[in-house]
Amino acid sequence: MHMVKFTPLVVAAIIATTAAADAQSHTAIAPGASYRKWEPIKEIGIQWRKRVWREVDMTEATNAFFNAPAMGNALIDVLMTGAKDKSIQVYSSIGDRFTTTLAYDQLVAQLKDKTLLAGVDGKQCANMNYMPSAVHKYIIKEDWLFLREEKKMVVRIVGIAPVGKVVGPDGAIADQPLFWCYYPDSREFLSRYAVAVAGQETTWEAVFGTRTFKSTIVKAGDTRVREEIGPGMYQWQKQ
């Protein structure tokens, strides 16, 4: 495996090139008709709930648009733009509970400290690892909620994390989330960015809202059922 280490001048040039590309390609659009604020769901109206984690693998042809859309708005670039202009808040990749916020400068510094596999062949190494080719998966954290009165299940995405292949100090390679975005607070921002899927223009918010991608469930929590314990009182029990 060929290891590439960039000098400060090369890193600066890459950042400048990326900024120029942002100005030209990653143009925002007005929020599309697909964007609607979520209807609030009251805790008391949920009969059972389950937390699920799924992977979106970019090596699947169906998901190729995540990193190489015709319109130039690769999802990682959109998220980095949002973090830079403070339209969205990003969180540390240590855990997925959205407890440690990251400013854009902190995020860039952390990414530069990592060495990731990138490129089409997955063998190029670079420490400018938030380029699209270094992200090969996304993790989606979501809640499945079955509503008691409506007798239907609602799925609400909680968070999204880009994943890269990180090369450790010992040369070991492991998939690692690069950072997390809290999805409910990012929906409106994602609705501003267009993306082409199967030749049709849509927005990133619509992609997630309509599940226009192929994914695999990799982890699921316990199903928790609401149990009445008194007038107006309840608790969640594992099923």
Image: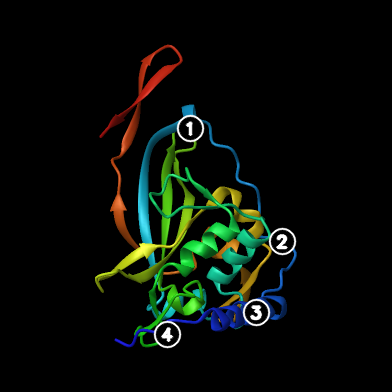
- Select label 4 or label 3 by which is in front: 3
Asked which secondary structure carries label 2, the reply is loop
- Select label 2 or label 3 by which is in front: 3
Q: Earlier in the sequence, mark 2 or mark 3?
A: 3
Between the residue at mark 1 and the residue at mark 3, the CA separation in whole angstroms equals: 54 Å
- Select label 1 or label 3 by which is in front: 3
Asked if the residue under mark 4 is in contact with the one under mark 2, i.e. CB atoms within 8 Å, the reply is no
Q: In this view of the protein, can residue 69 be seen by the observer?
A: no
Q: Amino acid at mark 2?
A: Pro
Query: Mark on residue 235?
Result: none
Crowding around mark 4 (Cα neighbors within 10 Å: few <14, some 14 to 19, many 20+) is some
Query: Mark on residue 31?
Result: 2
Query: Mark on residue 119?
Result: 4
Q: Earlier in the sequence, mark 2 or mark 4?
A: 2
Q: Earlier in the sequence, mark 2 or mark 1?
A: 2
Query: Mark on residue 149?
Result: 1
Q: Amino acid at mark 1?
A: Glu
Between the residue at mark 2 and the residue at mark 4, the CA separation in whole angstroms equals: 32 Å
Residue at the far top in the pictured view: 231
**Percent position (x, y) of residue 170?**
24, 70
Q: Amino acid at mark 4?
A: Gly
Between the residue at mark 2 and the residue at mark 1, the CA separation in whole angstroms equals: 32 Å
Q: Earlier in the sequence, mark 4 or mark 3?
A: 3
Residue in the picture at 29% in, 86% down: 1
Query: Mark on residue 16?
Result: 3
Crowding around mark 1 (Cα neighbors within 10 Å: few <14, some 14 to 19, many 20+) is few
Determine whether, in the image, residue 167 is placed left or right of residue 85.
Answer: left
